[in-house]
Image (cartoon, helix red, strand yellow):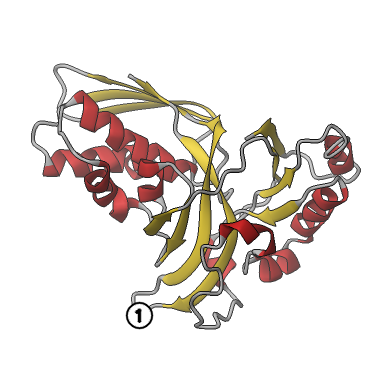
Amino acid sequence: MRLLPNCKINIGLHVVRKRADGYHDLETIFYPVYGLHDVLDIEIAEGSEDIELTTGNLLIDCASDDNLVVRCYRQMREKHPQVGSVRVHLTKNIPFGAGLGGGSSDAAHTAIALNELFHLGLSKKQLAEEVRSLGADCPFFIYNTPCFAEGIGDKLTPIRLNLSGLRLVMVKPPVNVSTREAYAGLTPDGKEGHYAPDYSDYRTYRNDFESTIFAAHPMLAEIKQKLTDAGACYAAMSGSGSTIFGLFENNAECGAGTDNRLKDKDFAPMIIFDNTL
């Protein structure tokens, strides 16, 4: 079985408050991007009692036991005895430390595959509960439709936002932003409803992390400005970064020369994804 775990972008991100458990309540829009995806090949493996994982393309910088694909498999096997051994090959295309949810998507799609391979009969709601403990945005990738997210990002409300036809340019420079760094120096205002799901006005949404992260990494602010200068109708950092993306109207002149604008300064090596939503 082959699945294509896609990434997402955050349109706006407002940090509401820090919780007693150390996590933060937030408000954001998750929007799926299907054009940039990993490749998950999974099959039943007879004669084994565990998961055999191999990877390709981008180097995965964690131990196999820490990979979310492996963690998802073992968690589901504990809960569902009918889950047998599997052989998995994961081709990584979604960059790490990018704010695009690649690892969470891999976990969610692993759960989807196991549900089908071993005939578990779990609904999407049940699958979302299965993967919730693996990552706050894992449930989103079970539904994989535009959602307004609250709580720690796991309380989802489907919305009708449709960006199809817009050109999306995503830039992942050689900068990694840790979750700790993203929240450092950020003072939540404690106000809910700052980003109510009035997605028709999404262009007014801003990412609260940008002020502190851009100060620490000026390169990110420069990339955002270059996307705006190239004609983006909306440009922002995705999640806690470090990917910066721009949305362009369906106009041949908009975005023209974006790559050259970005290469005016030495941002290399970086990953540029340019496609139509």
**Percent position (x, y) of residue 272?**
71, 36
Q: Which residue is mark 1?
A: 20
Residue at screen point 34% across, 75% down: 21
Q: Quadrant of residue 73?
A: top left
**Percent position (x, y) of residue 77?**
16, 38
**Percent position (x, y) of residue 213?**
67, 65
Q: Is residue 103 left or right of residue 232?
A: left
Position above or below: 197 against 272? below
Q: Is residue 115 left or right of residue 107?
A: left
Position above or below: 8 against 14? above
Outermost residue toward the top in this view: 46
Give whichever of 189, 213 is nearer the camera: 189
**Percent position (x, y) of residue 72?**
28, 42
Quarter of the rendering occupied by the N terminus? top left
Give whichever of 14, 56 is nearer the camera: 14
Q: Is residue 130 left or right of residue 137?
A: left
Give whichever of 57, 115 is nearer the camera: 115
Residue at screen point 91% across, 43% down: 264
For residue 62, say whether it is visible.
no
Residue at screen point 44% across, 33% down: 5
Q: What secondary structure is found at the residue carrying circle 1?
A: loop
